[in-house]
Amino acid sequence: MSDGADLELVEHLVERGVLAHSARATVEVLSGGVSADVALVTAGPRRVVVKRALARLRVAREWSSSPTRVETEAAALEVARRILPANVPTVIDLDRERSVLVLECAPIDAVNWKRELLAGLIDPALGGRLGAALALWHAHSAEDPEVIDRFSHDTHFFDLRISPFFLATAEVHRDLEGRIHEVVERMARRRLCLVHGDFSPKNVLHGHDWCWVVDWETAHTGDPTFDLAFLVSHLVSKSVHRRSDSPRYRECALAFLDAYRRHGGVPPDEAGLVPMIGCLLLARVDGKSPVDYLDEDGRERLRSLGRAIVAGERRDLDALWPDGPGPAGVTR
């Protein structure tokens, strides 16, 4: 941000009562992905994260979504916090008029899980912790009619996931269009619980004894299969990037899925899980939000893998991994 933008942001926080009038604040721009401007604002011991949703996302292809999704994010965080208060940040302020959300800042030892995974630091135990947390979020929300009704409008999920991931990919892979649309239709019929919609390693922050899941702006009442497929697709994509670590990524994915089931998560669409993962793998190459760590060879290998899965040539979880089964003793 420029000095003028920094000053404007601090003035906004003072106006909203987040900071004291006498506060001397510093502003640090954070990586907000493609959908938001995100900054860390520090004023003495006070540290907050400020997120302003963008109407047009930062990608090469045209991709828009209403900034009102910050309201969905704030509401979803409140629900998630009621269920597992230690696993999400606190909402400090929401300015609906300006689409600005202020959140508690993560502890100083926070590490982004995506960065760790890309560096080959793969901890299946963290995968298990995330599976357990997701199970409780899904299960508790499924039993709450108010939550089901509050998040029944899935416009943001369509704008940020269905259209840019599934429909855009179907336009590229016309021979698989029918199969991709079938996955979307199966998912649309299962409106069972609060689904995060972006359950990705980039949205996991953790430290020695804590773990947060952030970025709930695509939360909606939907199919729990999507959150499972989304995280596993990220681990598969990284196994294509770091092929020698493929068994460990696989172990992490299985720990995640096993913990989800053990902790009573809403049953996923078992027959639809692998095809959905295949669609998401294709989307990370040919959709509107391709992964940023693959070279051309990696993109082609991921594309080939995704096509084989969507076409039905690879039908189970063991067939997802580019270099075969994982280490001995790991079961599905």
Image: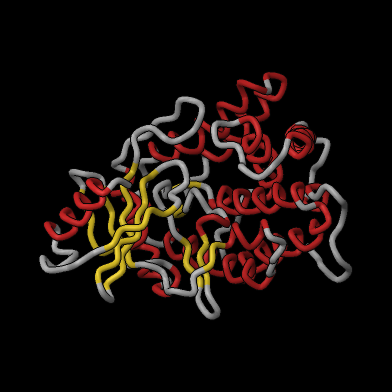
Which of the two residues, 67 or 225, is positioned nearer the viewer here?
67
Q: Position of residue 240 (x, y in %)?
A: 76, 47
Query: Which quadrant holds the C terminus?
Result: bottom right
Residue located 76% across and 59% down the image: 250
Instruction: Give left or right: position of 61 versus 292.
Output: left
Q: Position of residue 78 (x, y in %)?
A: 32, 63
Residue 280, image quadrant: top right
Q: How is the image coloured?
A: secondary structure
Regarding residue 146, the answer to whether it shows in the image is no
Residue located 60% across and 49% down the image: 230
Q: Position of residue 25 (x, y in %)?
A: 24, 64
Which of the two residues, 31 or 247, is positioned nearer the viewer here?
31
Instruction: Give left or right: position of 264 versus 79.
Output: right
Count of labels in the image = 0
**Residue positioned most to the bottom:** 209
**Is 43 drawn above or below residue 40 in the view shown?**
below
Which of the two residues, 138 or 29, is positioned nearer the viewer here?
29
**Residue positioned most to the front:** 3
Q: Position of residue 85 (x, y in %)?
A: 39, 73
Residue 47, image quadrant: bottom left
Instruction: Give left or right: position of 227 versus 298.
Output: left
Regarding residue 232, the answer to whether it shows in the image is yes
Residue located 19% across and 58% down the image: 13
Residue located 49% across and 48% down the image: 197
